[in-house]
Amino acid sequence: MTGKTAEQMEEQNRTTRREIHRLMREEKLSESEALRRVLPSDRNRTKKLRRWKEKGLWPLPDSHVREGDLLSGDNSEIQRQPVKDGLSEAEVLRKVRAMLDTIEPAERPVGATAKGRKSPLQTTMIAIRIPTALDGELKSLGGLKSRHIEKAIMLYLKAMNVESDPDA
């Protein structure tokens, strides 16, 4: 690992997406040409683009792209933006998706719980029952279901705390 934090990697991805969008808009390049120009040495650039599309991060909605402004890492900007009456459900969900990508669950130390070792990350085990259909949807996302649930709970708490936070 190169030592980059998740925030640094996300900021780099944001900048890359913003630059690809700019090239397509200003220089009228195709998606693949802009991708090739921005990521010339990245052999996995098409996979990266496909992942962005799957996660709802591409294409960028014009409402998110202003002069150098693409949902910065500071979530307070997003929380203080009033939701306009004309905003469609799809646009709101895109914004929520972008917020989800900024939420990073606690990093699990690798090998910390191997045979007799206690993990330095303090956790609590809970049992939940969820509908079978929801379980199927979680499985289809790939990755650990607990990570998806943890991010969903963190987003929920963020939304619930906005009402009680006088500065928001």
Image (cartoon, grey):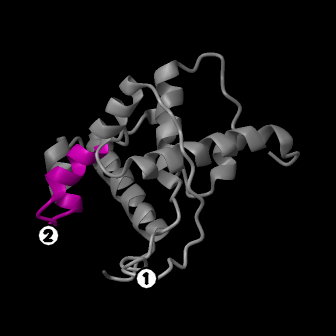
Residue 122 percent location from the top left of the image = 60, 70
Q: Earlier in the sequence, mark 2 or mark 1?
A: 2
Relative to the observer, which residue lies in front, 135 or 165? 135
Q: Amino acid at mark 2?
A: Ser
Relative to the observer, which residue lies in front, 42 or 69? 42
Does 114 appear in magenta? no
Q: What residue span does the magenta drawing correspond to? A: 37-52
Q: Amino acid at mark 1?
A: Gly
In the displayed structure, 120 sits above or below 17; it is: below
CB under 8 Å between discs 2 and 1: no
**Rendered image: mark on residue 41:** 2
Q: Residue at x 51, y 59 (%)?
A: 105
Label the magenta part by its dominant secondary structure.
helix
**Total numbered circles:** 2
Secondary structure under tag 1 reads: loop
**Residue holding disc 1:** 116
Q: Is residue 16 left or right of residue 146?
A: left
